[in-house]
Amino acid sequence: MHEPDTKGAALSRYTPGESSANRGLKTAVAIVGGVAVMVLIAVTVLVLQRPGGEGSARGTDDESATEGVAVSVSQAEIGRLTEGRAAALKDKDEKAFTAAFAGDARTQARRLFRNLRKVPLTSASFRHVETIGRLENSFGGGVNATIDVHFEHQITGVDLAPVVEGYRWQIEKKKPKSTPVITKISGIPFKKVTDDDPDTALAYPAPWDLYEDLRIYRGDHLVLMSSAGQAEQARRDAPGLERAARGALSAWKQAGAASKPVAPGFAVTVEPDKRQSGRLYGRSEARGEAGVEIPMRGAGAAVSYPYAGGRVVLQEATERVGEHEMAHALLTPLIGQASATGLDGPQNWLVEGFAEYVASRGEDDRGGQSALRRAGFDGRLPNQLMFYSQDVTRTAANYELGRLAVKFIAETQGKQKAFSFVAAQYGEPSKLDEQLKDATGLDKQAFEAQWAEHVRSTLR
């Protein structure tokens, strides 16, 4: 709508030196001319706004949008992005799987699809859990938003139930009738406690995200993953790691410790490179451990298992290191809701002591006693907060103290009591005193005194 030209109206009202007749004639001409201009403008606007008219938003059927028309991404469209990827994976249809991705993200998606086709999966689905940003643009232009998606999957023979890897997808929809596409893939980041904390993500990247060509070796109780460059070495490591898997499983079975199920097998990645190893499963920093186990969160809002499986990453793929980390993964499904959501988990001396006891088959074979002699022994169980010390000798000594604690209970009360104690602590870490008394008949102070004497006798 145009505002009236007030300057022109003032001049037409009266011009000095002209007769009143001429002024009237000019006024009439000005009025008629103004009406004509207004009619012309109105007709032009109608023509421009008429579908298919000159200057209109042509081809709404060919997915171009009129400036100012809202562009939005519906929940149904998001559903097609997620459910379509799962269906395409199930149907082994690479073209359908990658169709929703654009640019570099399509290259990533192609690699992901080809790698996942090699992994033995009981189930695999993608579920939208959160939207970051607006899914509607009412001011012209397209929509750029971020959605968090859970890749809920279950590795056959490894996970007791589906577990979660977190993807963050950047999505774009340019025009009202366009199909939204995924333009960037990353991991769902964890919130940092302090600014100095490393960047971490929800189990991303997994080996199928990290490696250009994922290689798989399947044993009776083992799914062994590696890059193509590490495949031959992984194949040579596989028999020893399969023995480690059988050892951890049989130790638990023979003890008859708990009625709750533990992991039936293990997913292991061999990655000797510290930088690559440190990136796997969302840790995002170079690490020096010979091996590490990462608990995997159970899928869904109401899960049967807060952690339904574990993933083992080995820089040193020896049978001894493998069995230690598999002992951790074995008990991951026993982690209870309280320890999964609370700040305090199971006692570190018991967690690491159990893994050392199982992997060493009851004997010290990693020089723990030598480290304990150098670090010194004060007669106390290791402190929970100071267990993982920057002093590697002190940490090795703490591992040995934990092993000796599990060994002491197993020798005095039997393996079933010892392993049942460990299982109970995984489920409810706050009940240590009660669990210790049930396992040994002693309160913590009395147990610690007797155990300390056992440690001293071992060191003599």
Image (cartoon, rainbow, N blue to C red):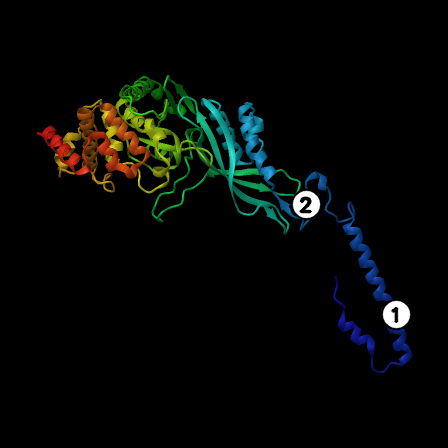
Q: Does the rendering let one see residue 213?
A: no
Q: Nearer the viewer, residue 151 or 171?
A: 151
Image coordinates of residue 284 in percent, x first then y, are 37, 38
Reply above or below: 223 against 196. Answer: above
Image position of 11 (left or right of 353): right
Image position of 178 (left or right of 451): right
Specify few, some or many for label 2: CA neighbours under 10 Å numbering under 14, 14-19, or 20 or more. many
Specify the amino acid type for callout 1. Val
Q: CA distance from mark 1 to mark 2?
A: 43 Å
Image position of 137 (left or right of 62): left
Image coordinates of residue 157 in percent, x first then y, are 40, 21
From this viewpoint, which residue is outermost toward the right? 21
Q: Secondary structure at mark 2?
A: loop
From this viewpoint, which residue is outermost toward the bottom? 17
Marks 2 and 1: in contact by CB < 8 Å? no
Q: Residue at x 47, y 31 (%)?
A: 152
Reply above or below: 302 against 316. Answer: below
Residue that numbered label 2 is attached to: 65
Q: Quadrant of the N terminus?
A: bottom right
Sequence-first tag of 1 and 2? 1
Q: Residue at x 72, y 39 (%)?
A: 61
Image coordinates of residue 309 in percent, x first then y, are 38, 29
Q: Secondary structure at mark 1?
A: helix
Reply above or below: 217 against 41. Answer: above
Q: Does the rendering let one see residue 354?
A: yes
> How many numbered circles does the render carry?
2
Image coordinates of residue 405 in percent, x first then y, are 19, 31
Specify few, some or many for label 1: CA neighbours under 10 Å numbering under 14, 14-19, or 20 or more. few
Residue that numbered label 1 is attached to: 29
Question: Which picture quadrant has residue 76?
Answer: top right
